[in-house]
Image (cartoon, rainbow, N blue to C red):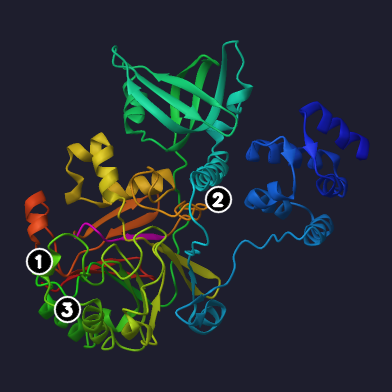
Amino acid sequence: MNLEILKTVRERGLLLEKDIFDLLDSFNDIILAKNFLEGLERFSGQKIITRSTLNKNFEYVQSIVNKLPGENKSLIESIFVKLGLSLEIRKEKEIAGKNINEMKSSTSFQVSCFDTTVTKKLEVSDFIGSFRARYQQIQRILMNRPELQQNLVSINKISNNRQSLAIIGIVIEKRITKNKNIIIKFEDLTGEISGLVKFDNEEIFKKGEELQLDDVVGIRASGNRDLLFIYDIFYPDALLPQRTRFDEEVCIAFLSDMHTGSKMHLQSNVEKFIEWINGDDETAKKIKYVFFVGDNVDGVGIFPGQEESLQLKSMKEQYGLLASYLNRIPKRITMFMCPGQHDASRVAEPQPIIDKNYAGALHDINNLILVTNPATVKIFEREKEFQVLMYHGASIHSFINGIPELREMKAHKTPAKAVKHMLKRRHLAPMHSAVTYIPNAERDPLVITEVPDILATGEVHRLDIENYNGTMIITGSCWQSQTPFEEKVGNVPDPCKVPIFNLKTRELKIFDFS
């Protein structure tokens, strides 16, 4: 085993830390050991392989270990423990004072939030690390596409000779030539290369037009290291092969953009909703979960001159009014609430839960779970699992402004069409300037790692519904009449609509409280 591993190391020009060499030597299968090493080199883009390399690529490492047979798997896992490495990706956290393990066992749901703490001053290297992490996460998704599995190479392996190949790269530059062709520059962990999309190839040209900076995609092309001629582009894409149906009739309601505290806040309509959910309506009786998807209050100092449009001048007053609503929601219903840009939480995503200093009244509500933005909620019925990804949706505007098709159709009127592109790209805000965000060198929290059953957003103040490859997209309504700013930009809100989803029948009903 030792000699075979040394031979592979020499052939590939690698330098291994002794602990990594010992780890590979513990594999019972030399082919498996070589494949593991070569894959680790490819994913990390490093020639020097250390324990730190394993840590930074832990999802790839875990995917390999999970495929090992029982005895071999146990042996390798024990060696990882000795190296001080953990293969446990998910860490249970405390949210709003409640332990997730306890919540799952007692109420049949599980919340996954992201670590939102910032422990040091951010530097350029942190953003580089974040893009590297994102690239590797989406690369793993793309490598499962059969169209990319033949002749897939890293950019530094492309020779001077013309060849047919596939690469996975991040878009770093895009321009139109004088002949109306598109030149796109791609980068992976090993280098950069330019590709050309011809104007007369309508199908691929449309895909090239849609590409945005920082998209991670796969391409099939022919050419050499000087230039590639692109003949197909592949997004990581989202596909939900099986649609979960519960045996029990459990319903979920979705609300967003309450904007309590604003002079335009529709308080009487909220009262109608509360009266209805406490009443005898058959659908209301089946509601077990309610999701509030951001901009729950109007905030203070969010934009210049906002104080003139406020009914309640302080955050505490605004959250006090909101809490008075929520305290009247039946206690049999569990509520989940994430922040938006107007809430008492930093704007940079992932956003922390709403601040207790301003919203103490919310933290005291027992059936309210405050979560980060974004957050995932998994609802369980025995072995069945239904997943809701909630994200307020600040990036929707950048999708509409950046993608020609959405811009031309004025997709602010049909925002779910913009949210489709989040699923298509497997990222909630792929363009660097789309939102303010906190970089994470270990794992990009805005990557859609698991395909949800429902992706729920807010932000645009218009209810819109779409289905995309098995995932239902719900962009939320609002509880605020048209603001002066909306009138100025031509956005017409569609207030007081509440979509209710039945987990047994998968039927979606819209209730209008306007």
Q: Check the image and report above or below for 46 versus 202.
A: below
What residue is disc 1 on?
481
Q: Given the image, on which type of amino acid does mark 2 rest?
A: Ala
The answer to whether 324 appears left or right of 334 in the picture is left
| Residue 10: quarter of image | top right
Q: Residues within 10 Å of mark 2 (few under 14, many from 20)?
A: some
> Is label 2 in contact with label 3 (beta carbons under 8 Å)?
no
Quarter of the C terminus within the rendering: bottom left
* Secondary structure found at label 2: loop
**Where residue 342 sits in the image (x, y, percent)?**
26, 65
Sequence-earlier tag: 2 or 1? 2
| Residue at mark 3 to residue at mark 1: CA–CA distance | 13 Å
| Residue in view at x 21 percent, y 71 percent | 258
Q: Nearer the viewer, mark 2 or mark 3?
A: 2
Q: Nearer the viewer, mark 2 or mark 1?
A: 2
**Where residue 198 sits in the image (x, y, percent)?**
36, 17
Q: Is 456 in the magenta? A: yes
| Residue in view at x 28 percent, y 62 percent | 341
Q: Given the image, on which type of amino acid does mark 1 rest?
A: Ser
| Residue in view at x 63 percent, y 23 percent | 157
**Where residue 219 sits in the image (x, y, percent)?**
48, 28
Sequence-earlier tag: 2 or 3? 3
What residue is disc 3 on?
270
What residue is disc 2 on?
441
| Residue in view at x 82 percent, y 58 percent | 79
| Residue at mark 2 to residue at mark 3: CA–CA distance | 42 Å
Q: Given the image, on which type of amino acid does mark 3 rest?
A: Val
User: Magenta segment, which residues?
Assistant: 453-461
